[in-house]
Image: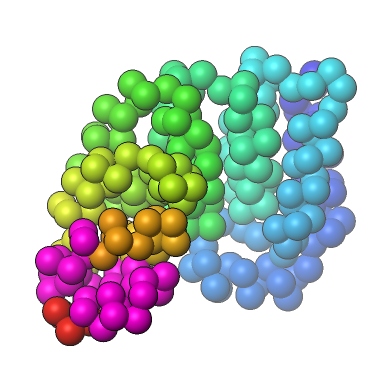
Amino acid sequence: MDVDQLVADVDAELRRQGSAERAANEKAYLKSRLDHHGVGVPAVRLLARGIARRRPALTREELIPLVEALWSGTFYERRRVAVELLEMCADRLRAEDVALVERLLREAETWALVDELAAIVAGGLVERHAELGAVLDRWAADQDFWIRRSALLALLGPLRRGGGDFARFSRYADAMLEEQEFFIRKAIGWVLRETARKRPDLVYGWLLPRAARASGVTVREAVKPLTAPQRAAVLAAR
């Protein structure tokens, strides 16, 4: 596989599909330091899918350099192609690839890249490799709030399905509950909301005694799937 040629092809396709107006709007909306072509997520995903479905399929030894090459550019959409490829080819990743994912998370600086890297790519690695829980423990205490957010979101998938490690999430969320950072507050509420869709009593029991400490955005998200009496009790406790 010629990585340079493949990246050049991606660049050409993004330029072809780009919209200057959309690029300006997205850059402003995301408060992004990156350049933007103005190509929507569905088109970016389709482009990544075409690469992922190449025959022969991408090996891990091809995937990693390609992701790094795409990420190294200054355009948001190129980085988004890299994230999509990591999602689509996640079965090729090994436990040690969490180091690459962590680097990308530290360099992403926007929820539009962080959230899928954390919830899907890092989360998938943690599900397959239980020993990576120690990495999440470190992330949860990191100075970078995007990394702390990633520790929370990496637990989302199994919790959303009705399983997962709620005890670990509880430890992380309890330590972060009084943080002022919006993206931390939102992430705690998001995970609680998705957990509550299958296990409302679990979330209610966790949130009620902490309602006075939790932010408004956390509570508003978390109570959405709860019963009306549960919602009322949590809101009254604030």
Where residue 145 sits: x, y (%)?
Answer: 29, 53
Q: Quadrant of residue 131?
A: top left
Q: How was this image coloured?
A: rainbow
Q: Is residue 198 left or right of residue 70?
A: left
Where residue 90 sits: x, y (%)?
Answer: 60, 30
Where residue 24 sits: x, y (%)?
Answer: 65, 72
Q: Going 63% across and 48% down the picture, which residue do you hit?
A: 80
* Quadrant where the image shows the N terminus: top right
**Residue 82 shows in the view:** no
Based on the picture, tell me whether residue 221 belongs to the magenta stretch.
Answer: yes
Q: How many marks?
A: 0
Q: Going 21% across and 59% down the picture, which residue do you hit?
A: 206
Q: Is residue 127 left or right of residue 63?
A: left
Q: Is residue 237 left or right of residue 158?
A: left
Q: Is residue 104 left or right of residue 177?
A: right
Q: Quadrant of residue 38?
A: bottom right
Where residue 46 sits: x, y (%)?
Answer: 80, 48
Give the answer, above or below, for where 213 lies relative to 70.
below
Question: For the magenta stretch, what is the residue range?
Answer: 205-234
**Residue 80 shows in the view:** yes
Q: Going 32% across and 39% down the picture, which residue do you hit?
A: 165
* Main secondary structure along the magenta-highlighted residues: helix
Based on the picture, tell me whether residue 145 belongs to the magenta stretch.
Answer: no
Give the answer, above or below, for where 94 lies relative to 167.
above
Q: Going 61% across and 25% down the picture, which residue do you hit?
A: 91
* Quadrant where the image shows the C terminus: bottom left
